[in-house]
Structures are given as C-alpha cells and as structure tokens.
C-alpha cells in the first residue's frame, strides 16, 4: 500500500529551482532515506513532504489525501516532522514538550484528554525518558534531547514521520541509539519513515530504500545496497568512494586524493 505519493514536485526560491520534477511513492511501513551532497535539495524536499513548503508545481499526498487541501491540524494528524535543529523552549519540561504533539487532537484551548495523557506517557516510557520527564528539556544532553524530540513526533501518533538529519551532532553511540529506535518503530509499529542522512554507511545500514538527489533531481532510487554500490553515488558526491563489506554490511569509505572536478 502506498502511504506517501509525490507527483512531479517542483520547488523554487525566487528564480532558483531547489527541487525539479520529483515523483516518488513510499510504501506504508517502510523507511526511505534521501541522500545527496550539500545543496542537492534534501531539506527542501522533506519540508515539502511534511506539507511545510508551498509547491511551485505538483502535489504531495499522504494516505490519499493532498496536503495542500488540508488544514494545519488535519495535516498534523497525518505526518509528524522533525527539523534538523528543533527549538527547545528553555524552562519547558520533557513531559510538557512531548505533550505539545497532542494539540492537533485536543486543540490549543482545551485540556488534554485521558487518551492524550496515556499516549504521551507511553511514548516517554518507550523511549526511556521516564527519569527525565520533569527535567528542563534544554538541559538534556544531545542524545537525550534528540530522544525527547523523537518522542514528541511519535506521540503525534501519525502514520508518517519525516526527519531532517535526526542524528546531526551526536556521537556514534547516540546516533546508533536514535536509528535503532526508529528502526524498531518501523518494524513493530508499521511506521513509515522518510529521513535525510549525511552518513552513507548508516543510511545503508538502517534504510529499506535510498533516493539519491543531485541538483534537485532524482539520480538514483532503489534498494539501499544497490544505491550504495552504484556509480551514480560517487558521481553525485564528486569523489571516489570505496564500498567494503564488514560483517555483511556495506561501509562507504572516501578515497583520499580522489576528488573529481
């Protein structure tokens, strides 16, 4: 079943084309990662996927509903978005921050229902944030803060979660923790995840499918293993890449002194 559908999407900023004529279908319960060099259009595309960018052309639909025809609260019940640098209000507890996700259901002027409170409490426990629920979210470490941000997205209880570089600034252990959490949600809860990642090895390790963007266009789209080992990958990044197998996993290694013009 197709959960997310992009039909000939084009995005422009003034006279600059950021994304050109991109069409994609993402199946329910799968993880699709968008990769590509800086300036490829990844952030613009995922913002459009979350309904946060006005399209110059084309349509974005989730569960057969066009995002441009929905009100904000209706859209928030379909897709959750995690930006690359989320704002964490100083003085707001982890519990209150995660609970913001439920406003789409109970409204800004009404108190949360019992179900809202149960959903928030369940996600906080699932992501092992129980010990921090009353802590100031801005005081958490990078890994803890990222788990809190992910908890807010999951408590939104949408079928689709879109994430822009969810592991930026984290050390290796916390990167793996966040990606393992997401993978578990995909496998156990049939969540549809669309993300951008800079780390090609981790993208290939956790993702069902990779979409390689180059100058705003899809250069390659397929199973993670195939895209990681494709000639198009090195062409897009402008450098020679070596892919080695480590315990059955593809590890992408840039070759020093092999930068292309």
Image: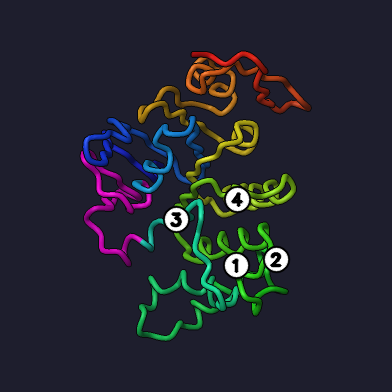
Instruction: Write down the residue under mark 3.
Output: 81
Instruction: Write down the residue under mark 1.
Output: 123
Marks 1 and 3, the one that precedes in the sequence: 3
Magenta stretch: give its range.
49-75
Instruction: Indicate which label's residue lies in the foreground, 4 or 3.
Output: 3
Instruction: Write down the residue under mark 4.
Output: 182
CA neighbours of label 3 inside 10 A, class few (<14), some (14 to 19), many (20+): many
Residue 252, percent from left and from top: 66, 25
Q: Secondary structure at mark 3?
A: strand
Residue 147, percent from left and from top: 62, 60
In the rendered view of the protein, which quadrant contains the N terminus? top left
In the image, 194: left or right of 8? right
**Alpha carbon separation for disc pair 4 and 3:** 14 Å
Q: Secondary structure at mark 2?
A: loop
Instruction: Write down the residue under mark 2.
Output: 128
Q: Quadrant of residue 198?
A: top right
Residue 135, percent from left and from top: 66, 76
**Alpha carbon separation for disc pair 2 and 1:** 8 Å
Marks 4 and 1, the one that precedes in the sequence: 1
């Amino acid at each position: 079943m197709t959960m997310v559908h992009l039909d000939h999407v084009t995005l422009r900023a003034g006279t600059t084309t950021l994304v050109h004529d991109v069409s994609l279908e993402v199946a329910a319960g799968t993880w699709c990662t968008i990769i590509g060099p800086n300036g490829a259009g990844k952030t613009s595309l995922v913002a459009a996927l979350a309904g946060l960018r006005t399209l110059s052309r084309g349509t974005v639909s989730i569960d057969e509903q066009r995002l441009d025809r929905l009100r904000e609260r209706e859209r928030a019940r379909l897709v959750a978005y995690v930006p690359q640098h989320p704002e964490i209000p100083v003085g707001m507890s982890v519990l209150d921050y995660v609970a913001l996700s439920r406003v789409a259901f109970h409204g800004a002027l009404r108190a949360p229902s019992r179900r809202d409170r149960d959903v928030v409490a369940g996600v906080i426990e699932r992501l092992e944030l129980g010990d921090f629920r009353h802590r100031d979210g801005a005081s958490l470490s990078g890994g803890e803060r990222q788990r809190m941000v992910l908890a807010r997205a999951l408590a939104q209880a949408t079928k689709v979660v879109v994430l822009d570089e969810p592991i930026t600034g984290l050390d290796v252990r916390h990167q793996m923790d966040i990606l393992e959490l997401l993978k578990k949600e995909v496998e156990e809860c049939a969540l549809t995840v669309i993300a951008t990642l800079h780390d090609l090895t981790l993208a290939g390790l956790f993702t069902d499918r990779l979409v390689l963007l180059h100058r705003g266009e899809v250069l390659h789209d397929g199973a993670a293993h195939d895209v990681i080992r494709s000639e198009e990958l090195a062409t897009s990044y402008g450098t020679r890449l070596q892919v080695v197998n480590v315990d059955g996993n593809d590890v992408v290694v840039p070759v020093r002194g092999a930068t292309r013009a």
